């Protein structure tokens, strides 16, 4: 990587970090305006998990992916958001959402299946594809976590 590319990458990372700091500053100002003890709550479960996922990806961009790794949490956040939107999710999409190598994502996906948090169904429209859904157990757990945010 040339020095110009490194400088450009550094500048982009700095601008993203600055935008994240600005977002946090605005959130704190809103919270302070509401009162010192008031908490700013997401409007919906979808907004809560979307914010969590967005902050995780921003953290990876600014600080680097090699510092953090929680593919199971990323999978659960993504599937919960998809459920909230009434959308289907494929195994491939789950792997992408985990932000790790496909083999690692599949290993953790199987752990979540084994814990009864997810289920895998054949796609009736495309026999080559599988649909992934959260089980009732998984949805209850995520509902409880999101309610505490």
Image (spheres, rainbow, N blue to C red):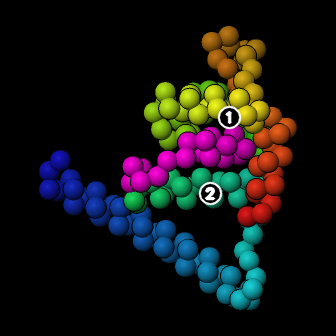
Residue 64 in the figure: left or right of residue 143: left
Q: Please indicate, yes or no, whether residue 85 appears anywhere in the rendered image.
A: no
Disc 1, SS? helix
User: Which secondary structure lies at badge 2?
Assistant: helix
**The one of 125 and 90 positioned closer to us in this rendering:** 90
Q: Quadrant of residue 82?
A: top right
As drawn, the label of residue 71 is none
Q: Residue 98: percent from the left, percent from the top?
A: 55, 40
Is residue 146 shown left or right of residue 93? Answer: right
Magenta span covers which residues?
64-81
Coordinates of residue 21 in the picture (x, y in percent): 48, 73
Left or right relative to 43: residue 60 = left
Mark 1 = which residue? 112
Say which quadrant the C terminus sits in.
bottom right
The residue positioned farthest toward the left in the image shown: 3
Which quadrant of the figure has residue 8?
A: bottom left
| Distance CA(mark 1)–CA(mark 2) | 19 Å
Residue at image point 68% right, 54% down? 49
- The residue beneath circle 2 is 52
Q: Quadrant of residue 29?
A: bottom right
**Mainly helix, strand or loop, the magenta region?**
helix
Residue 60 place in picture, x, y as percent: 44, 54
In the rendered image, the vertical position of residue 111 relative to residue 149, given as above or below: above
Dot 2 crowding, Cα within 10 Å, few <14, some 14–19, many 20+: some
């Amino acid at each position: 990587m040339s020095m110009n590319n490194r400088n450009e990458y550094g500048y982009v990372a700095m601008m993203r970090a600055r935008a994240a700091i600005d977002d946090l500053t605005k959130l704190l100002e809103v919270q302070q305006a509401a009162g010192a003890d008031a908490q700013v709550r997401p409007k919906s479960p979808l907004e809560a998990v979307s914010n969590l996922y967005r902050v995780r990806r921003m953290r990876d961009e600014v600080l680097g992916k090699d510092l953090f790794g929680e593919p199971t949490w990323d999978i659960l956040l993504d599937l919960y958001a998809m459920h909230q939107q009434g959308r289907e999710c494929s195994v491939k999409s789950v792997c992408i959402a985990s932000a790790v190598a496909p083999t690692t994502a599949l290993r953790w996906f199987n752990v979540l299946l084994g814990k009864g948090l997810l289920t895998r169904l054949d796609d009736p429209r495309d026999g080559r594809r599988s649909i992934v859904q959260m089980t009732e157990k998984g949805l209850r757990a995520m509902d409880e976590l999101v309610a505490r945010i």
